[in-house]
Image (cartoon, helix red, strand yellow):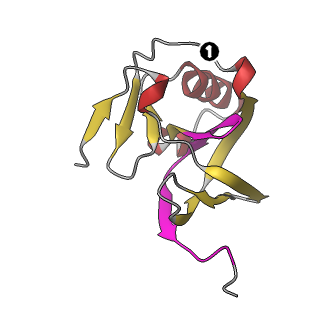
Amino acid sequence: MKKSKRIRSRLDMEAIYEIIVSICPHVVQVFGFRPDDQEVMVEFSPYQGIKIITEDCVPADPLPDWFINEDQLIEVRNSAWLSALKLTLSENDHDADFLDKAKHFVLPTQGAEIQIIASGYTLKKVKIRQSK
């Protein structure tokens, strides 16, 4: 099991900057730069929900159910949003179980926070900037 640590403050979160978000059927891709200038792409697939919240509207601390994993991605445990989606799904389709494996992820970025409900993700180092 991957190790994770509790986030005690928003200062614990590394922001990704200069982001590009691509939303396609079943896949969300976020391209950007980490604080160490590493160029990365995080792909969430399949996804069931996405929210982009400006930093002015992001709730303040504390973050009791937020944990950061070894890839520096935040996972919200006991997510109210995920619970609400599961309830709605069960009302619409009693046999559907695809949200059973889903997790609530958060990507802090400069100026906004991207929240995604997805079954999994892949983190890749990529080349965004072209060499001169």
Answer whether residue 128 is magenta in the image: yes
Residue toward you, 93 or 4: 4
Q: Which residue is mark 1?
A: 59
> Is 68 positioned to the left or the right of 120 in the image?
left
Q: Residue 29: x and y, percent?
A: 66, 60
Residue at image x 70%, y 26%?
A: 55
Residue 130, x across and y down, in percent: 70, 82
Q: Is residue 77 above or below residue 100?
A: above
Q: Disc 1 on helix, strand or loop?
A: loop
Which range is magenta?
Answer: 107-129
Residue 128 can be seen in this image = yes
In the rendered image, residue 39, in percent from the top left (x then y), is placed at 56, 66
**Res. 45 visible in picture:** no
Query: Relative to the observer, which residue lies in front, 93 or 24?
Result: 24
Q: Position of residue 76 (x, y in %)?
A: 46, 29
**Which amino acid lies under the numbered mark 1 shown in the image of this protein?**
Pro
Residue 93: quadrant of the picture: top right
Callout 1: few (<14), some (14-19), or many (20+) C-alpha neighbours within 10 Å? few
Majority secondary structure in the magenta region = strand
Task: Look at 66% across and 85% down and name the residue there.
Answer: 131
Image point (71%, 35%), residue name:
111
Q: Is residue 90 left or right of residue 7?
A: right
Q: Quadrant of the C terminus?
A: bottom right
Residue 126 falls in image quadrant: bottom right
- Residue at image point 37% right, 20% down: 8
In which quadrant of the rendered view does residue 4 lie?
A: top left
